Amino acid sequence: PAAAARKPARAAVAKAARRAALVVMMSPPEEVECDVVIVGGGPAGCTCALYTSRANLKTVMLDKNPAAGALAITSHIANYPGVEDTQMSGAALLERMRDQAIEYGTVARRAQVFLVEADGDSKTVYTPDLTVKAKALVLATGAMGRPPSFKGEDVYLGRGVSYCATCDGAFYQDREVAVVGVNAEAVEEAQFLTKFASTVHWVTAVDPKPDDAHAQTLLAEPNVKHWSQTRMTTIEGDDSGARHRPPPPRHQTRPARPPRSPSPGVTGALLHPKKGDGEPISLPVEGVFIYVAGSKPITDFLDGQAVELNPDGGVKVDEEMATNVPGVYAIGDIRNTPYKQVVVAASDGCIAAMSIDRFLKGRKTIKVDWIHK
């Protein structure tokens, strides 16, 4: 009898919970007004927020997932000015950037933006739980990577798989790496890797064109092995794989840290040549750099807006990071710049912030963040 009595009680509680959830879902979203709203919380967005907040502009920064951006998934940071700790992860650096912006007054909210209204003097940004109205709108959503093309690519991303040789090349001093792709970016990045790697295995499904001077220069490098008309199908790795570690500094001024124990990472790549007997070939590489498709700027939430895009899909801006729509700015990888570096994204954020400060305060000149006396 007691158990029977508890059943209606539990049903009533469940019904009340469902009703409460429905009320929350039907409730109008919170509305916030500010001077500057930044869509995206990567290095570009955080830097912009830092500068606008220091300029006494009320700033709201919206980010759908702080752990999902290009910097957040980077395992080591070794080429950002002032970062001496070569064991620092991209996520740790991004957290410092975000905390610094918040310290100066930025309101950081986790929210998925699904629509913006960019025309007029007031810009409106819509999320499921929050509507933000601002005098200036900054687009800093970055670019999304394509779906993984190879087995193991997503598993070892940031642990031997990379899309940026300029960022990670120095981690592969005297080691074997593979570069997959035949486009101009692949050629340029493979050339960069020849400075560090003992062997650069260049894997191309089709042959580079004979009149491609850059490709022919790459093929002439003594430490480049070209796998012509070959597909990579699998990236291999295990828990004993010695993940790439930063090289020791050339001029040691303090005792070196003890080496870390090996951690999971790439140990090889499986190739399938189109010619010959078709037998798969296993390459003993520790790094795989993939350039089979470009990243796509995240601009879907701009549908119906007058913000002009470049033919490559990036948002078109001038030298002040301003778009063709007054009061709307774009920074970082959403511009689809070929220089996809943290320091470049941060620079974009600084430029946009100082331009916004001038725009909102009606000044003719940029006001710097310091004063010489």
Image (cartoon, rainbow, N blue to C red):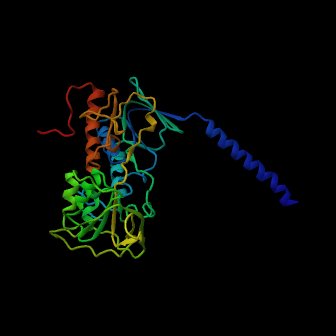
**Looking at the picture, does residue 20 appear above or below residue 203?**
above
Q: Position of residue 102 (x, y in %)?
A: 37, 46
Farthest-out residue, front: 276
Farthest-out residue, left: 373
Q: Quadrant of residue 326?
A: top left
Quadrant the N terminus occupies: bottom right
Q: Position of residue 80 (x, y in %)?
A: 25, 55
User: Can I make out residue 328 in this image?
Assistant: yes
Q: Residue at x 20, y 37 (%)?
A: 368
Q: Residue at x 21, y 74 (%)?
A: 255
Q: Is residue 177 left or right of residue 306?
A: left
Q: Quadrant of residue 328?
A: top left
Q: Position of residue 337 (x, y in %)?
A: 29, 43
Quadrant the C terminus occupies: top left
User: Can I make out residue 88 in this image?
Assistant: no
Q: Is residue 87 left or right of residue 116?
A: left
In the foreground, 109 or 112:
112
In the foreground, 202 or 330:
202
**Looking at the picture, does residue 141 appear above or below residue 8?**
above
Q: Residue at x 77, y 50 (%)?
A: 11
In the foreground, 50 or 272:
272
